[in-house]
Amino acid sequence: MNRRIVLSLIASTLILATCRSESKADANKGGDAKEVVVQLTNDGFKKLIFNYDAGKEWKYEGTMPAIIDFYADWCGPCRQLSPMVEEIAKKYEGKIIVYKVNTDKEPALSKSMGISGLPSLLFIPVNGAPQMSMGLLSRESLLKAITDVLLVK
């Protein structure tokens, strides 16, 4: 009887060890690649972008130009825009920060920013007022906004 218990414990230990090493391997696949588009919450927005509770006058908290993509999972044009936003984030990595806000999960933030249509992109230069764009943008329009509004070449 003791032998069966010992064998069961050994087998359980081996199974658990195998499962742990497989899940670590899965977690490390592509582990060197960091996310270039950052999911932003209402609290994160207040800390990193603008604390709209503290004042009405715009004061950007960041040190690098930013784009915020306001989207919803159910929105077709948002799904079309998403790959372009990710491409822009990779192309301009180190020059601009790209954020995404899921409007269904962050309704207070969406309301505070006056989001009434999707997709909406907020272009935030380091100095000066941000500019909002509603609707699906072409790649050319997106690139033009980066150079004209964010002043990034």
Image (cartoon, grey):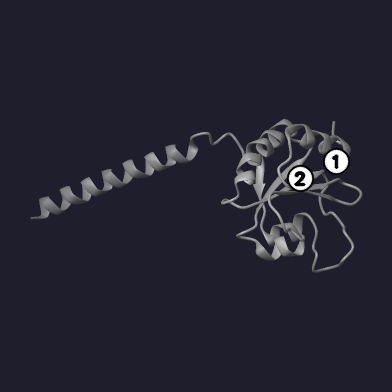
Identify which residue is drawn at 78% across, 55% down: 49
Residue 150: mark in rendering: 1
| On screen, residue 6 above or below 30 | below
Where 92 sits versus 23, above or below?
above
The percent coordinates of residue 125 (x first, y second) are 86, 45
Q: Nearer the viewer, residue 139 or 55?
A: 139
Q: Is residue 75 left or right of residue 65?
A: left
Asked if the residues shown at circle 1 and circle 2 are in contact, with their CB atoms under 8 angstroms apart, the answer is yes
Give the labeled residue for mark 2. 67
Number of other residues with Cα within 10 Å of mark 2, as a class: few under 14, some 14 to 19, many 20 or more: many
Q: Quadrant of residue 148?
A: top right
Inter-mark Cα distance, 1 to 2: 9 Å
Image quadrant occupied by the C terminus: top right
User: Disc 2 residue type?
Assistant: Ile
Where does the N terminus fall, quadrant-wise? Answer: bottom left
> In the rendering, at what x and y percent does residue 103 appear?
65, 57
